Image (tube, rainbow, N blue to C red):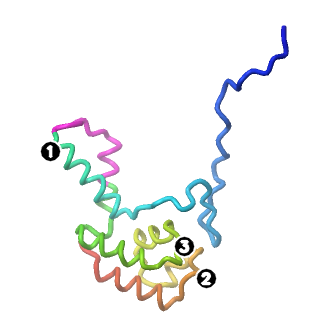
Amino acid sequence: MSDQNHAPTSRSKPPPPGEEEAGAVLKLGEFDNVDTLTLSEASLVINALMTKRKKDRKDRNETEVLNKTLDYLDAFARFKAKENVEAVERLLSAHKELTKFERAQIGTLCCDTSDECKTLIPSLSDKISDDDLQELLDDMGKLMSS
């Protein structure tokens, strides 16, 4: 038997789950600065992909997971019209002081008040004033569609 150093036979261990935290200080780990989507944006993307696949007559096998995802997005996406989804994205993108994750959360939750929004997204507390946040929420509220 020789004591030769062999290459590892397994992959490196992934970081333990639960290291990420969306509290007063964001700890997103490998997801920091990753582009994020609101539920409304995700709905647009998936529906556009499905429309293209049907048009191209490809992948007619819709899975149960895909159908459940579409049902979920249809139920919880606050903005239905493409123009409104894009307008909300422009409103959110104008706030460069917020992370992509925070902007996606604001666009998904669509809170009524800045206080509610800062309670649900605690990392916003020192990043945006209550007045500016309320103005953003009010502008988004005008774009909500059924």
> Going from the N terminus, do you reach mark 3 or mark 1 first?
1
Q: Which residues are magenta?
A: 57-71
- Residue wearing tag 3: 121
Q: Which residue position holds label 2?
A: 126
Q: Is residue 19 magenta?
A: no
Cβ–Cβ under 8 Å for marks 1 and 2: no
121 to 135, vertically: above or below: above
In this picture, residue 136 sits left or right of residue 30: left
Give the distance between the C-alpha atoms of the residues marked 3 and 1, in whole angstroms. 40 Å
Vertical order, 25 against 134 (above or below):
above
Amino acid on which disc 1 is placed: Lys
Name the N-terminal-most of marks 1 and 2.
Answer: 1
Question: What residue is shown with label 1?
Answer: 55
Q: Residue at x 45, y 84 (%)?
A: 113
What type is the residue that disc 2 sits on? Asp
For the N terminus, which image quadrant?
top right
Q: Position of residue 37 (x, y in %)?
A: 41, 62
